Image (cartoon, helix red, strand yellow):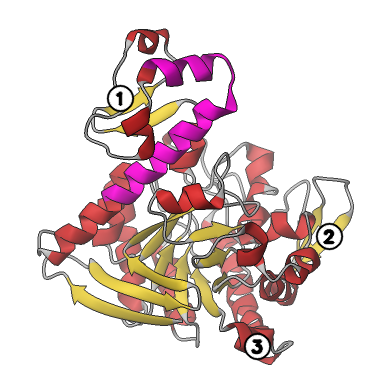
Amino acid sequence: MNFKILKKSKISRARLGFLETDHGVVETPCLVPVATQAVVKTLDSKEVQETKSQILIANTFHLHLKPGEKIIDKAGKLQKFMNWKKPLMTDSGGYQVFSLGFGTDFGLGSKILKKEQERGEAIKENAQPQKIKINHDGVVFRSPINGDELFLGPKESIKIQEKLGADIIFAFDECTAPLADFSYVKKSLEKTHRWAKICLKAHSTGSGQAKKSKQALYGIVQGSRFKDLRLESSKFIGGLDFDGFGIGGEFGNDKKEMHKMVGWVVDELPEKKPRHLLGVGYLEDMELIIKSGVDTFDCTVPTHYARRGIAFTSEGKLNLKQTKFLKKREPLDKNCICNVCLNYKKDYICHLLKAGEITGMKLLTFHNLYYFNTFVEDIRTKIKKGEI
């Protein structure tokens, strides 16, 4: 992978650049849509490409469970398996340490909400989730499919990701819960840092597939909302020989606070390497995180909301399940030129959603991705013009 910065803003940390991989070039900054199980739900790969999506991220843990990395490897790696001709990322499985652990126990998302803050810090040092076991070497899971015991650690994660064959892979880490206190996060960070070094060694001295496939390996900065730990992690991970860096965990519940906290991390990372923000990408977040110096970021918002009937438009968010849209014989967004807005009307999409037809979700997914990608495209233009 080759990363090049073309322009740096004079008024923020924003920058224009490109990531060059074996499967094509990605213009940055860029949204990375989520293809958890090697698919963007409801769309085929050709349709995803038509939404102006440049790169996708798939989920290592779920693909390990089904169909298994050996099947994908035999198929010629992920791109051939899913007929996606552009670049791909795979996460490490670190997010599942949170989502299947404390996330399940407390009913939490990885981003802290005001109501969660009010509950206080419930996760103390040495606490363990109910359904998984986090130890020195990795994490013991129970398969959500058949209950079998599964172990995932840094070496295992790298081995799986090498077989999956994405262009960019991530080091295995622990994504801590937003209710974890300082002592818990500090101890967790020690594991994440130790695992990062193991991932680097496993990737460079493994089967040799890494060098053949030219996979780039990103380290992940953690530290939750604690400035001291964020700075410590940024310096440690930034000092290792990674090809790029992921920024994980939670950043508080205030957008301006998030912008400031991402800035702490970015200022400590090597300037010439790419930075990826994990799991953040609401429309209102995008300009702020790009101004913070982030190059790529993944988010389920455009697809997740679409499957629940929500369209993002120049009028704001629209809930197409509302009966009033049955009387709206007009495009989803008059200012959008995506295939859905040019060919379908609100009344028809509303009907499909009310009838429980999958096509309604498909149309909104296509539009939302196109809308989000166009939004980021416009930000790239603003950076070019010196407006951001």
Q: Is residue 179 above or below residue 382?
A: above
Where disc 2 sits, the SS reads: strand
Badge number at residue 331: 1
Q: Position of residue 142 (x, y in %)?
A: 83, 51
- The mark nearer the N terminus, 1 or 3, is 3
Q: Are marks 1 and 3 in contact (CB under 8 Å)?
A: no
Amino acid tagged 3: Lys
Q: Where is residue 14 in the image (x, y as percent from the top left)?
A: 23, 66
Q: Are marks 3 and 2 in contact (CB under 8 Å)?
A: no
Q: Position of residue 16 (x, y in %)?
A: 25, 70
Q: In this view, does 200 lie above or below 56?
A: below
Please tell me whether residue 358 belongs to the stretch shown in magenta.
yes
Badge number at residue 201: 3
Instruction: Tell me the CA gap for discs 1 and 2.
Output: 48 Å
- The mark nearer the N terminus, 3 or 2, is 2
Instruction: Tell me the CA gap for discs 3 and 2.
Output: 22 Å
**Crowdedness of circle 3 by 10 Å Cα count: few (<14), some, many (20+)?**
some
Amino acid tagged 1: Pro
The image quadrant of residue 339 is: top left
Please tell me whether residue 27 belongs to the stretch shown in magenta.
no
Badge number at residue 150: 2
Q: Residue at x 60, y 50 (%)?
A: 39
Which residue range is magenta in the image?
347-375
Closer to the observer: label 1 or label 2?
Answer: 1
Q: Residue at x 39, y 74 (%)?
A: 19
